[in-house]
Image (cartoon, rainbow, N blue to C red):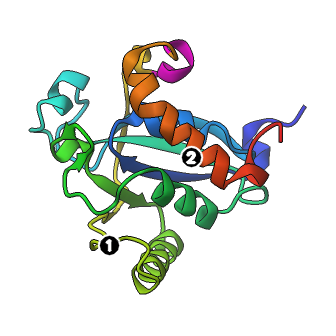
Amino acid sequence: MENKLEKNLETAVFGGGCFWCLEATFKMFRGVESVMPGYAGGEKVDPTYEEVSAGGTGHAETVKIMFDPSIISFETLLEVFFTVHDPTTLNRQGNDVGPQYRSIILYIDDNQKEATEKYIQKLEAEKIFSDLIVTELAPFDRFYEAESYHHDYYAKNQAAAYCQAIINPKVSKAREHFKKYLKNS
């Protein structure tokens, strides 16, 4: 049996509002080995959910995606990311307001930085969004794993009102737009 070390996995770190939404969405894709909710992009060491939620740590709610680039590319992950959240709202996604909910991509290397810049330029040239994209692009530094009760939140709480109203539409949109990349499709 092949283990993850033998697969030559790469990492992507995205923040686009609540990490529950992104975790549920990215877990559906072939080539995505794991999606971990957490905090990144800030100054505080080992922040808690309560500290990040208060908005004073500088961190955003993010997901750390481990993926096999021979199955799904970083560019495809970017496409999914920009489809399932609004990259034009500064420090907000819907009713989630504050810097902890900002749109952010923490690039691992220059290839990811260049791919992201190129993709944003393409979206803006094609006028995909009526407003300018405000997604922050920053070098990856540290990722702090979220508390265990945040892991697989959607899978464990699909009947919850937040999951029904906020996460379901994003998951449905991803399923509709990216059928050929989904697991079990």
* Mark pair 1, 2: CA separation: 19 Å
Which mark, residue 87? none
In this picture, which residue range is highlighted in magenta?
151-157
Decide whether residue 84 is among the magenta residues: no
Residue hosting label 2: 173
Residue 86 pos. (x, y %):
35, 56
Q: What amino acid is labelled 2 in the image? A: Lys
Q: What amino acid is labelled 1 in the image? A: Ser
Residue 40 pos. (x, y %):
31, 44
Residue 41 pos. (x, y %):
27, 50
- Placement of the N terminus among the 4 image quadrants: top right
Is residue 36 toward the left or the right of residue 47 in the image?
A: right
Is residue 147 toward the left or the right of residue 5 in the image?
A: left
Quarter-of-image position of residue 44: top left
Q: Residue at 50% of width from left, 22% of height from top? A: 154
Q: Closest to the observer: 14 or 171?
A: 171
Q: Which of marks 1 and 2 is nearer the N terminus?
A: 1
Q: Residue at 31% of width from left, 63% of height from top? A: 135
Is residue 8 toward the left or the right of residue 137 in the image?
A: right
Residue that lies at the very extreme toward the right in this rendered image: 1
For mark 2, give the secondary structure.
Answer: helix
Near mark 2 (Cα within 10 A), the count class, few <14, some 14-19 or many ≥20, is some
For mark 1, give the secondary structure.
Answer: loop
Q: Closest to the observer: 164 or 35?
A: 164
Query: How many labels, in total?
Result: 2
Decide whether residue 153 is among the magenta residues: yes
Q: Residue at 60% of width from left, 67% of height from top? A: 75
Q: In this view, does 108 lie above or below 142?
A: below
Near mark 1 (Cα within 10 A), the count class, few <14, some 14-19 or many ≥20, is few
Residue hosting label 1: 130
Query: Can you see residue 149?
Result: yes
